Image: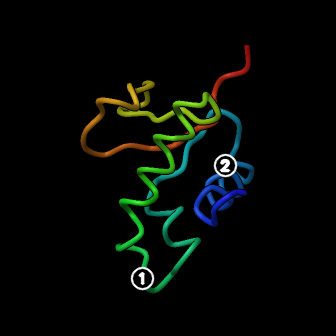
Amino acid sequence: MTSPIEEAIFALLAEVAAGKSVSPEQVARAVDAEGWRRLLPQVRATAVGLARQGRLVITRHGKPADPEAFKGVYRLAVPPSE
């Protein structure tokens, strides 16, 4: 069963051009436009889980980041096709 956050991540990624990314704030606002700030920790946790599964790439400064060790500002992207 997918969460609303996971659904929002993939819906937003489907709307951006190939190679582009979305911010965690965009995801949180898509789920709850009023209370989006309180969702940011859940967006991060969901993103880390999806990155561990290989379904998502977490980027920092445009480069893939280790989902276990990244800090600071990050973005979410579709994994590059093999």
Q: Are marks 1 and 2 in contact (CB under 8 Å)?
A: no
Question: Is 15 on the left or on the right of 57, as rendered?
Answer: right
Disc 1 from disc 2: Cα separation = 21 Å
Question: Is 82 on the left or on the right of 58, as rendered?
Answer: right
Task: Locate residue 76, reporting x and y percent.
Answer: 51, 43
Kind of residue at badge 1? Gly
32 lies above or below 39: below
Q: Quadrant of residue 15?
A: bottom right
Q: Which residue is mark 2?
A: 13
Other residues around mark 2 within 10 Å, as few (<14) / some (14–19) / many (≥20) = many
Other residues around mark 1 within 10 Å, as few (<14) / some (14–19) / many (≥20) = few
Quadrant of the drawing holding the C terminus: top right
Kind of residue at badge 2? Leu
- Front: mark 1 or 2: 1
Q: Residue at x 63, y 66 (%)?
A: 4
2 lies above or below 38: above
Task: Locate residue 80, reporting x and y percent.
Answer: 66, 23
Q: Which residue is mark 1?
A: 35
Task: Locate residue 31, reporting x and y percent.
Answer: 57, 73
User: Upstream in the sequence, badge 1 or badge 2?
Assistant: 2
Q: Secondary structure at mark 1?
A: loop
